[in-house]
Amino acid sequence: MNLIIDCQILKISGKGWQKGKLKMQIYISNVTTNKYTLYLEFCSDEPVKPESPLDDIRKIIEVR
């Protein structure tokens, strides 16, 4: 069974919410000892911005 829903998750940095889609897959099996298996995957609507090597230096400067 597959289900995809719109959702928002709190960003790891704690700076706001990130919009995207949550994909849930549920597998039911009578063959294995784990009868139910649930897979979750979050797909962001926002493009992933690579972190700049200068970000660490900027953070140090902001603290001072």
Image (tube, rainbow, N blue to C red):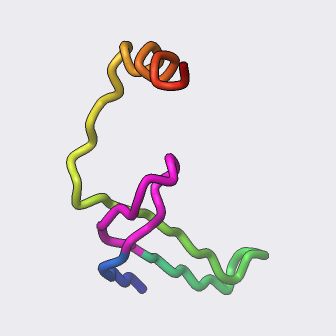
| Picture quadrant of residue 31 | bottom right
Q: Is-magenta flag for residue 10?
A: yes
**Residue 19 coordinates in the image, percent (x, y):** 30, 67
Q: Is residue 46 left or right of residue 17?
A: left
**Residue 2 percent location from the top left of the image:** 38, 82
Of residues 4 and 32, the one drawn nearer to the viewer in this rendering: 4
**Residue 51 versus residue 24: which sits nearer the camera?**
51
| Above or below, 23 relative to 12 | below
**Residue 31 or 25: which is nearer the viewer?**
25
Residue 44: give x, y in percent of width and height.
Answer: 30, 58
Write down the quadrant of residue 35 in the picture: bottom right
**Residue range (magenta):** 8-23
Farthest right residue in view:
33
Left or right, 50 with respect to 30, comes to left
Q: Quadrant of the N terminus?
A: bottom left
Is 5 colored magenta in this rendering?
no
Quick check: 52 above or below 16?
A: above
Question: Looking at this rendering, what residue extends furthest in the front direction?
Answer: 64
Query: Does residue 29 sit above or below 52 in this rendering?
Result: below
Q: Residue at x 47, y 63 (%)?
A: 10
